[in-house]
């Protein structure tokens, strides 16, 4: 069983290496002017907090007190993970560092949830005497209590990959990636005093290896997803009653073929790795990690009866997201939001939006600079008109909390930054245009190093193929730095070299920059993803 799961997960990782290699061959020209969809503020670098947690993988929790709470997979005083509070203004506080012991957990992959008693509850993937994971409670003051240690005895649950949800009966419910009578994962119940019950053992036909957090439906039952298994072994959506009766609502369809990169495609998506959202309209919303029309995952809507509609098939590459690990969030206006692990101009993840009218936009592509970080695993949280999220990595290596200001009808972003087209053939030109009326200074980074005013334009004529990431940082009178970015993809005939080179500026201005080559970018980001996933899915 262990070997079978490992092969499947390695297959997912290996196929992602080709994500950016599709740039030259697969991207259609963009004919209209493209304005930036959002501005970014860096709220907090997690590594800046003394003994703070790092490597955040879960969903940030917005608690009743208006602050965010994070359970990190690494960092803390003992490098085993930590719990942190982060205010919307960016003040980070270490609440607790996990410590080595036979009872205490380590490496929480999932975030905490807040129960009706005001305390926080969560899981750790490792830890305990047999290092098969734990369930814990922690207070807002940082008092930690272990509720149970998973052992796998008597076909019990172990390796809880995701977090918990509180049912209508007050008990907590979760899933494990392994364990159960078939060692294909379980659904479990645990009371707040630590009484553990296995409700269901998955058996492949009804799903295998659940990763996503459960949610409570309008009927009081629990709804979730499995990574694999089901009728076509591409994952399922299921309903389970509080007494353990499970019904498979939907099985994702088989691959109908493979694209030129060897990535499987189908009509609806495959292998969901996140849980569901119960939307304002009563339908369920979720994501799949791969599959869909282009093979890089999808966003879907499912009725309570199990009718699925694909809202977005991710295309990957520099101009779209790819491979979402996170589920869906919903804003007050009904818009849907999420992140992808891959895709974007540097292949390091994106933030996306589907508005109430169904229009898709890539709001931000992470570039791993001092601006934003890279590889978002979790959801974004709408709050006071902004979107808050956390990246797994940043320039300090520990991840960062970021805030996005979105473009919206009738509003103007603090930093307006656009490019005339995001895809050109070698020898063609593109024009950058920017304006920040409230800024005192603006500076450039990334693919340009020009000295600029707070507004202006610049025409570029690249002399080699590749991807250029243009960063713009503007500081207002209050000293607040707001970032905007855009990207330019330059394609070349297949036989042409894509070595880095100079850019000739049409206005005769000075300065130059080197383009990261497509092959090097794909190899670097793909191998990094493979290393992360091999560690991420290590089975004992």
Image (cartoon, grey):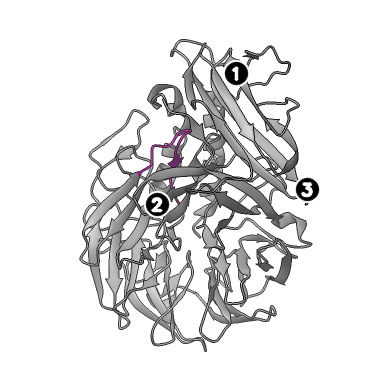
Q: Earlier in the sequence, mark 3 or mark 2?
A: 2
Q: Residue 391, can we see it? A: no
> x, y (%) of residue 335?
41, 56
Q: Circle 2 sits in a helix, a strand or a loop, which is it? A: loop
Neighbour class for label 3 at 10 Å: few (<14), some, many (≥20)?
A: few
Q: Is residue 533 left or right of residue 471?
A: left
**Residue matched to label 2:** 355
Magenta stretch encompasses residue 317:
yes
Judging depth in this view, the residue of 460 and 74 nearest the camera is 460
Picture quarter with the N terminus = bottom left
Q: Is residue 443 left or right of residue 160?
A: right
Q: Quadrant of residue 516?
A: top right
Vertical arrangement, residue 156 with respect to residue 362, above or below: below
Neighbour class for label 2 at 10 Å: few (<14), some, many (≥20)?
A: some
Q: Quadrant of residue 505?
A: top right
**Residue matched to label 1:** 460
Judging depth in this view, the residue of 334 and 409 nearest the camera is 409
Q: Residue 100, can we see it? A: yes
Write the start and end of the magenta stretch as one range: 313-324
As drawn, the label of residue 477 is 3
> x, y (%) of residue 443?
74, 34
Q: Circle 1 sits in a helix, a strand or a loop, which is it? A: strand
| CB contact under 8 Å: marks 1 and 2 | no
As drawn, the label of residue 319 is none
Judging depth in this view, the residue of 40 and 369 nearest the camera is 40
| CB contact under 8 Å: marks 3 and 1 | no
Q: In which quarter of the image is residue 279?
A: bottom left
> x, y (%) of residue 398?
68, 52
User: Residue at 75% across / 65% down in the picture?
Assistant: 77
Magenta stretch encompasses residue 300:
no
User: Residue at 47% across / 15% down in the picture?
Assistant: 492
């Amino acid at each position: 069983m262990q070997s079978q799961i490992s092969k499947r997960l390695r297959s997912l990782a290996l196929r992602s290496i080709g994500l950016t290699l599709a740039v030259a061959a697969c991207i259609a020209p963009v004919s209209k002017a493209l304005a930036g969809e959002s501005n970014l503020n860096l709220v907090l670098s997690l590594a800046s907090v003394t003994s703070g947690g790092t490597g955040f993988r879960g969903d940030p929790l917005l608690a009743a007190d208006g602050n965010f709470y994070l359970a990190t997979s690494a960092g803390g005083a003992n490098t085993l993970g930590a719990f942190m509070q982060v205010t919307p203004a960016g003040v980070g506080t270490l609440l607790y560092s996990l410590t080595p012991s036979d009872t205490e957990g380590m490496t929480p992959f999932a975030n905490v949830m807040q129960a009706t008693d005001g305390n926080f509850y969560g899981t750790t993937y490792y830890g305990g005497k047999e290092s098969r994971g734990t369930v814990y409670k922690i207070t807002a003051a940082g008092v930690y209590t272990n509720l149970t240690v998973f052992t796998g005895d008597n076909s019990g649950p172990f390796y809880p990959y995701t977090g918990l949800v509180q049912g209508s009966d007050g008990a907590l419910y979760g899933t494990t990636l392994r364990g159960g009578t078939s060692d294909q994962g379980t659904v479990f119940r645990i009371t707040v005093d630590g009484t553990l019950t296995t409700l269901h053992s998955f058996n492949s036909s009804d799903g295998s290896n659940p990763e996503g957090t459960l949610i409570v439906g309008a009927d009081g039952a629990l709804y979730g997803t499995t990574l694999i298994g089901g009728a076509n072994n591409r994952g399922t959506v299921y309903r389970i009653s509080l007494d353990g009766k499970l019904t498979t609502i939907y099985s994702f369809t088989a691959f109908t073929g493979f694209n030129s990169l060897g990535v499987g495609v189908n009509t609806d998506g495959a292998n969901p790795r996140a849980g569901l959202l119960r939307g304002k309209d009563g339908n369920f919303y979720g994501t799949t990690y791969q599959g869909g029309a282009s093979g890089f995952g999808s966003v879907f809507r499912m009725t309570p009866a199990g009718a699925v509609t694909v809202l977005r098939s991710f295309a990957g590459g520099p101009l779209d997201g790819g491979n979402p690990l996170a589920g869906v969030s919903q804003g007050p206006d009904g818009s849907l939001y999420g992140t992808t692990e891959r895709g974007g101009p540097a292949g390091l993840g994106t933030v996306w939006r589907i508005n109430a009218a169904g229009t898709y936009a890539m709001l931000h592509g992470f570039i791993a600079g001092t601006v934003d970080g890279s590889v978002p695993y979790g959801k974004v949280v709408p709050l006071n008109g902004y979107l808050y999220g956390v990246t797994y990595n940043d320039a300090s290596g520990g991840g960062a909390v970021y805030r996005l200001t979105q473009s919206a009808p009738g509003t103007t972003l603090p930093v307006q930054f656009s490019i005339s087209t995001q895809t050109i053939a070698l020898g063609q030109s593109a024009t950058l245009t920017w304006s920040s009326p409230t800024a005192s200074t603006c500076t450039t980074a990334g693919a340009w190093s020009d000295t600029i005013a707070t507004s202006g334009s610049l025409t570029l004529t690249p002399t080699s193929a590749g991807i250029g990431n243009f960063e713009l940082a503007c500081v207002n009178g209050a000293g607040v730095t707001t970032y905007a970015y855009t990207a330019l993809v330059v394609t070349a005939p297949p036989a042409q070299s894509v070595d880095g080179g100079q850019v000739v500026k049409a206005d005769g201005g000075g300065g130059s920059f080197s383009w990261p080559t497509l092959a090097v970018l794909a190899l670097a980001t793909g191998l990094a993803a493979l290393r992360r996933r091999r560690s991420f899915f290590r089975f004992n």
